Image (cartoon, rainbow, N blue to C red):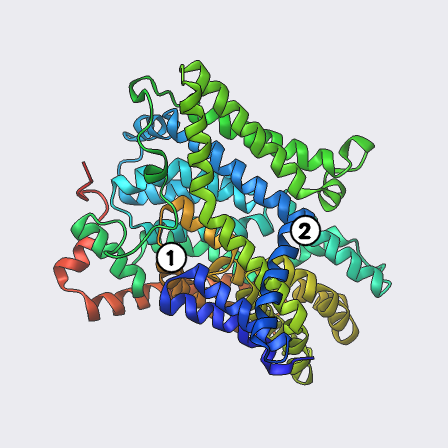
Amino acid sequence: MFGIWSIIPPLVAVLLAILTRKVVISLFVSIWIGGLIFTGGNPFGAVAMTFTWMKDVMVDGWNARFLVLVAFLGIGAAFMYKIGGSYALVRSLQHKINTRRRAQMFGWILGIVVFFNDYVNSVIAGNASKDINGKYRVSKEKFAYILDATAAPMATIGPVSDWIGFQVSLIAAAFVSISMVETQPYFAFLSSIQWNFYSILSLIAVPLFIFGKDFGPMAKAELRSLKTGKLIEDGAVPLSSVEMDLGDPINQEKANVWFFILPLVTLIGVGIWALWYTGGGPEGKNLMDALADTEVDVALQWAACAMTVVGIILALIQKFSFKDIEDTVMGGIRTMLPALVIMILAWSIGAVTDALGTADFVVESTQQWMSPALLPFLIFVICMFISFSTGTSWGTMAIMTPIGVPLAYSIGGLPLVHIIIGAIFAGAIFGDHCSPISDTTVMASIFAGSDHIAHVKTQVPYALLVAGISGVLYLFSSIIQIGWLLLLIGIVALVVLSRLLGSWYQKKHFTEEEIALINTNEKVTVNS
């Protein structure tokens, strides 16, 4: 309806955020520009539409519950910190995790283990490994990348998650639309995993850069952190800081590692049970059917609330005063306030793109190029653009699955359908991984304690490397129709290119002493 004008608001949001480093202002301006386009150039009408869109996303039931969920996650994490759980965990692990690489791998392994939700992934992996990574002078930018590169990619291919339930439900709806009876939606999803190149390669890239050589802005961030002990660059502002918002833990000498474990076990246990329960598990549905029908927002809200309650009980056992408890609750909400504001504005950008027909324009603009050989690559690129521009992977999946699956079935049959499902999910994850307006990217910045735009700028080169390799693999999918074989080729390419880029960049920009320092592991000087 609005043609090429429809892509201007999300582009403005991304460009302004990178140029000004002010995410909130950039998002607000881009929403207003969307209102300007929508109202035909009326500036006052644009202001009215801006606040209408913001109101609409805040009163939406799903969004409102997610705002409460994020607040509860902040409160629960605040109690884990304030009662000394995080401190006790670092103290108990300091003899086993005694190198930079082990500290970084600890964060990555936690991200792999907590596969059932990307939000919970960031909370757990971030809280558990942030302090110990800081001790070994791992830059906040690198730590945020480790969190971000595992959260959504793992949730979309993990054995059981709310993401998989959502994805299977989209596949099922698409199959109904084309009267597909050749396979079941869940088995189609399983067959598509080997074609989800971006997610799998993104997970593999993290240890490659932990044990290999960083390049680009990330290498500069790591060198700064190692040389000066400054975990963020001068002038950078963390999206949130637990230490600033909450102060020091109370009764550190009495801190016990169980103060960390119990709230997290509660979060995971109640979360998994609630996902099953709200999806109809008690009615006899199997696990995957229950996950497909689950009320994710309600289930995770229950889990986060239960985590908070356990935190309060532990605080009372430690003889916290009611004032201490109230201050911790408010501090936890304050920690998540930037995320809450950015999520509202990011959802509003989504409302803008819906109103302007951004996704329809992108799809229609590329339909004339579609062929069985090019379709996986084009679908992947389109999903990358939509998810990066809107900051929502689920929205991208919801838009593209009903379009891509019937199109693939009509021109290539079931084998092409599996490839396209993988390409859709892979492209959607790209935006969720590295868009500055993605909620998962925001959560990674918060729980890493990183400046948000610094996090985006340092991880984009890594994401583009993985996306570039993935795109080439999709171009070859019509020739080599074995996903796992292509994936193996992609892994080899990733290993070779990451090492070549790291060596080339460091030799060009760093001295020999700096190269030795940035690639050190065992004898790194740690912060006191």
In the rendered view, tell whether residue 430 sits above or below residue 112.
Answer: below
Q: Is residue 10 left or right of residue 21?
A: right
Instruction: Classify mark 2: helix, strand or loop.
Output: loop
Mark 2 or 1, nearer chain start: 2
Please identify the quadrant where the N terminus is shown: bottom right
Write the residue at 33% across / 29% down. 87
On the image, the x and y values in percent for residue 80 come to 43, 29
For disc 2, the marked residue is: 60
The numbered dot on residue 291 is none
Q: CA distance from mark 2 to mark 1?
A: 30 Å
Mark 2 is on which residue type? Asp
Mark 1 is on which residue type? His
Which callout, 2 or 1, points to the residue nearer the camera?
Answer: 2
- Foreground of the two, 6 or 465: 6
Q: Quadrant of residue 185?
A: bottom right
Tags 2 and 1 touching, CB below 8 Å: no
Please identify the quadrant where the C terminus is shown: top left
Q: Is residue 522 left or right of residue 193?
A: left
On the image, the x and y values in percent for residue 406 come to 77, 69
Write the residue at 67% across / 69% down. 355
On the image, the x and y values in percent for residue 318 come to 40, 15
Q: Quadrant of residue 67?
A: top right
State the residue lying farthest toward the bottom. Answer: 368
- Can the viewer see residue 483? no
On the image, the x and y values in percent for residue 420 come to 67, 67
In the rendered view, tell whether residue 109 sits above or below residue 362.
Answer: above
- Foreground of the two, 56 or 251: 56
Instruction: Classify mark 1: helix, strand or loop.
Output: helix
Write the residue at 44% across / 68% down. 464
For disc 1, the marked residue is: 455
- Can the viewer see residue 64? yes
Q: Residues within 10 Å of mark 2 (few under 14, many from 20)?
A: few
